[in-house]
Amino acid sequence: MADPKMTQHTQTVLRTLLGRGADGERRTAMLTEGLYGLELSRATGLPNGTLFPLLERLRQAGWVERYWENDDIAEAEGRPRRRFYRLTSKGADLAPQALAEAMVTAAKVELGGITRPGLAGGTA
């Protein structure tokens, strides 16, 4: 499957899975263990109806993998198992570059709409 489209939501999820903004220890845990669905929803602010289809597209593109936590952990805590999501090695390699390219593209789009007073026609 082709690389995912870099929408704002996709960028938010990738930044979160990369551990951007997290301290060193938490970032390492996020990269190795991933985050379960509710954690991702809270961290990104995205509703489930947006988040989970996006995660599935990232999974199909090979950028994200999902797995169930160990039954013993869930039973010990008296709750259902959680499904975790983490970047694959492909996703960890490609996501930073894709995010950087998306930022450059966004900056170009923003600059294209700026008017510059004093020039004929008011635009650059």
Image (spheres, rainbow, N blue to C red):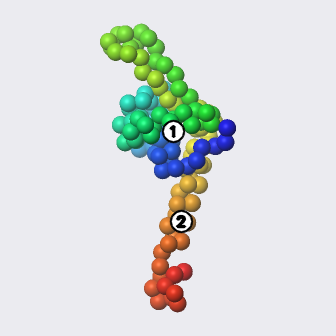
Residue 21 x, y percent position in the rendering: 41, 44
Q: Secondary structure at mark 1?
A: helix
Indicate the amino acid at tag 2.
Val
For label 2, count other residues whose C-alpha is less than 10 Å away and answer few (under 14), some (14-19) or many (20+). Answer: few
Task: Answer with left or right where residue 46 lies relative to residue 114.
Answer: left
Q: Residue at x 50, y 67 (%)?
A: 110
Residue 114 x, y percent position in the rendering: 48, 75
Based on the displayed image, in which of its 4 quarters is residue 49 positioned?
top left
Q: Residue 109, which numbered label?
A: 2
As drawn, the residue found furthest toward the left would be: 78
Indicate the amino acid at tag 1.
Leu
**Position of 76 relative to 36 (above/below):** above
Based on the displayed image, in which of its 4 quarters is residue 51 positioned?
top left
Does any portion of residue 102 appear in the rendered image?
yes
Mark 2 and mark 1 lie on one chain; the one further toward the N terminus is: 1
Q: Secondary structure at mark 2?
A: helix
Do labels 2 and 1 touch, CB within 8 Å? no
Task: Answer with left or right where residue 25 lies relative to residue 119.
Answer: left
| Observer-nearest of 62 and 24 | 62
Disc 1: which residue: 54
Quadrant occupied by the N terminus: top right
Quadrant occupied by the C terminus: bottom right
Residue 37 x, y percent position in the rendering: 42, 30
Could you tell me how far apart the alpha carbons at marks 2 and 1 are, in whole angstroms?
24 Å
